[in-house]
Amino acid sequence: MNRVTRRLAIAVLAGLVGGGALTLPGLGAPERSGLVTVRPLADSFVSSAVPRRNFGRARTLRVARSPRERAYLRFRLRLPGSVRRARLRIYVLGGRGSFKLALVPSSRWSERAITYRNAPIPGRAVSVTRAHHGWSQIDVTPLVQRSGLVTLAVGASRGAMRFASRERGARAPRIVVDTASPGESVIAAAGNIACDPLSPSFNNGVGTATECHQRATSNLLVGAGLAGVLTLGDAQYACGGYAAYQQVFNPTWGRVKGLVHPVLGNHDYRPGPLAGTDCDPAALPSGYLRYFGTAAGDPSRGYYSFDIGAWHLIALNTNCGEIGGCGPGSAQEVWLRADLAAHPSGCTLAYMHHPRFSSSWEQAGNTELDAFWRDLYAARVELVLAAHDHVYERFAPQDPNGRPDPMGIREFVVGTGGFSHHPFFAVQPNSVVRNNTTFGVLKLTLRAGGYDWRFVPEADAFADAGSGSCH
């Protein structure tokens, strides 16, 4: 028995005798239900001072601004459920400064062959952390969304630092992933998503720095173990034309089309021919209905309900002028009251395109939706999701008049699906968190009796997370 085999056998025996969980290099093993720890399959660093030299056997990973030195970590993730949160833990041996973290698009590199000359180029940095001796922990949830290979690059934004490599055993880097437990369902939501293919900002699908990020936000959904995806309206600009859906939405968010539960946005009713690609000349949502088919519910209504796990979800059509109104006694309001009465217990989420409350420029308080909110509040609905305003905003639980109420509705505005951003103006009462510079999706972990939320950014340090209980 060689040394490596002997050490592995001792580790296995210790894990069995002790009754604890075992974490092996490169493999995910549960520390508790839903928690997985993964150590690197490979790591190394590269240096511009010696661009042809390989440091794959080093016990130390060096990063520095000058000479330019960067560390690479490759992990193989085998996750038992959808990702709630992921953190990189890395041990700082010494140095001063701050380090940045980025996803590397390619994991096709060898620990014993990587050099500065042949190393893959990292993507945009998603976080910057000040170095302190000992363990540092960085949220990498946007970068770790599915099983498979993932490579992270660590670089210096200031100064120079040394980290423990995987050869240092107990101080080796690791990713700790919190996944959904049995009985939980994870869904994702966002609106204002895909650019028109004729838009100059579409840029052959690449987008610009500030617009048309539908590809990047869709990457947060694919292979993420989701139970459902809620598109909160205006999924395809500029007018919801069927050809535009096929050209832009379908190759991006359409990769999870089988999970999508859509609602109509105002752009789905936008008339042609000047508004965008393949617009309906009668300003009807024909492209939306043709693309989503039966997933969109009754085509004459645009509203419907369904269940995911222990939760009841209600999709509403807030294009009130197109459907005969949203006030008391309207067809949809009567249906809503009946649907709520038919599902009196458990937890409920409603979602729609237009928000009732918003601090963005579109509207401060959309009173046209007052009857819906009064019905939802009376039925003790927990959550309402909306978009329309191209921002992220979370409100504290409130009543239909906008007054704080611990038994009220918590509203999220998630208009961050990729199209563009809007400014904020007058901050509304009970607005807790606001962001209008980051694209991303809201992920909700739904379980009997409660929920967790986490905003997952495309590539940014902004985050918002928390938990709540059902009424």
Image: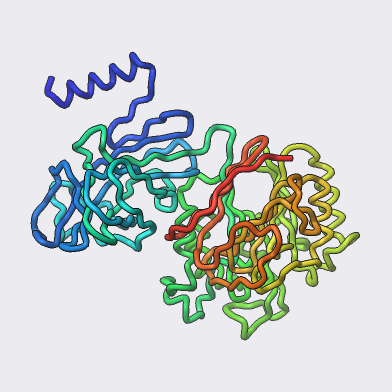
In the rendered image, the vertical position of residue 443 relative to residue 264, given as above or below: above
333 sits to left or right of 395 = right
Residue lying at 15% horizontally and 58% vertically, measured from the top left: 47
Q: Residue at x 64, y 73 (%)?
A: 425
Residue 340 in the figure: left or right of residue 422: right
Q: Nearer the viewer, residue 467 or 2?
A: 467
How are the residues colored?
Answer: rainbow
Tag count: 0
232 or 290, which is in the foreground?
A: 232
Q: x, y percentage for residue 259?
A: 57, 51
**x and y percent of residue 107 in the render?**
27, 52
Report x, y in % for residue 110. Answer: 18, 49
Find residue 50 and report its image quarter: bottom left
Q: Is residue 98 above or below residue 2?
A: below
* Residue 24 image-quadrant placement: top left
Q: Is residue 211 left or right of residue 467?
A: left
Image vertical order of residue 441 relative to residue 179, above or below: below
Could you say which is closer to the camera, residue 42 or residue 241? Answer: 42
Query: Where's residue 331, x and y in %?
Result: 86, 60
The vertical placement of 169 against 228, above or below, is above
* Among the 4 quarters of the image, the one containing residue 317: bottom right
Of residues 372 and 262, which is closer to you in this image?
372
Can residue 259 be seen in the rendering of this structure? Answer: no
Q: Residue sitting at 59 percent across and 58 percent down?
A: 433
In the rendered image, the quadrant that contains the C terminus is top right
Quadrant position of the N terminus in the picture? top left
Could you tell me which residue is drawn at 54 percent across and 68 percent down?
194
